[in-house]
Amino acid sequence: MKLRIEITEDLQEHEVVVRCSRMDDKVSKLQEFISTMNTPQLTFYKGTHEYYLPLESILFFETEGEQIYAHTTNDSYRVKRRLYELEEILPRSFVRAAKGTIVNTTHVHAINRSLTGASQVGFAGTHKQIYVSRHYFNSLREKMNERRV
């Protein structure tokens, strides 16, 4: 793998371009690493406490009424952002699973596919589960297949 750095003084922000003949494990890991450099810091709320959790610990985000909650293996926390805002800033491992849900594909353990309705997603080490609507199922499956490469 070759590395070339060009310094251009009139750029407003840094730009990284990767040229490759195919997407392989090295390129995927490089993409993931660069993406984590721009990972946003979110504040999570529970009662009167503020928490600063790593995004890797989040299983999924979901709406409940007007509120957005981030779920970990053992708990849930309120987030003061909308799902569409989260979708724009979260790393690539997070993908929309339903109108009111964004899932972290790195924690998906199993998908119980239903041909007639929403498919059920299970996570390792917890009883929590979500449903993936038919509309978003293919994008989730594609992301899961990327994870295996």
Image (cartoon, rainbow, N blue to C red):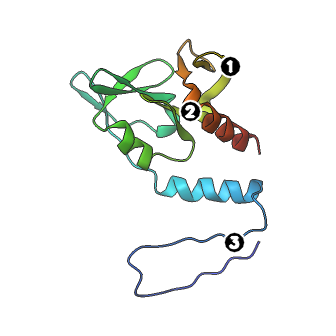
* Location of mark 3 (residue): 19
Compared with 114, 82 (above or below) is below
Q: CA distance from mark 2 to mark 3?
A: 30 Å
Q: Please name the amino acid that badge 1 sits on.
A: Arg
Disc with the residue nearer the chain's start (1 vs 3): 3
Q: Nearer the viewer, residue 145 or 32?
A: 145
Q: Earlier in the sequence, mark 1 or mark 2?
A: 1
Instruction: Residue under label 1, please give it.
Output: 113
Marks 1 and 3, Cα distance to the nearest angstrom?
36 Å
In the rendered image, the quadrant that contains the N terminus is bottom right
How packed is label 2: few (under 14 Cα within 10 Å), some, or many (20 or more)?
Answer: some
Dot 2 falls on a residue whose secondary structure is helix
Give me the residue at 46% from left, 56% from top. 38
Tell which circle, 2 or 3, labels the residue nearer the N-terminal end: 3
Residue furthest top as drawn: 127
Q: In 3D space, how far apart are the residues under numbered discs 1 and 2 (Cα atoms)?
A: 12 Å
Q: Amino acid at mark 3?
A: Arg
Q: Secondary structure at mark 1?
A: loop
From the top left corner, tell me how far across and down residue 44 is, in percent. 33, 33
| Image coords of residue 114 (percent x, y) | 66, 16
Q: Residue at x 47, y 39 (%)?
A: 55
- Amino acid type, residue under disc 2 in the picture: Tyr
Residue 125 % position (x, y) = 61, 17
Looking at the image, residue 66 sits to the left or right of residue 139; the answer is left
Secondary-structure class at tag 3: loop
Q: Residues within 10 Å of mark 3 (few under 14, many from 20)?
A: few
Disc 1 + disc 2, Cβ < 8 Å: no
Point out which mark residue 136 bears.
2
Quarter in which the C terminus is drawn: top right
- Depth check, mark 2 against mark 3: the one in front is 2
Q: Is residue 15 above or below residue 35?
A: below
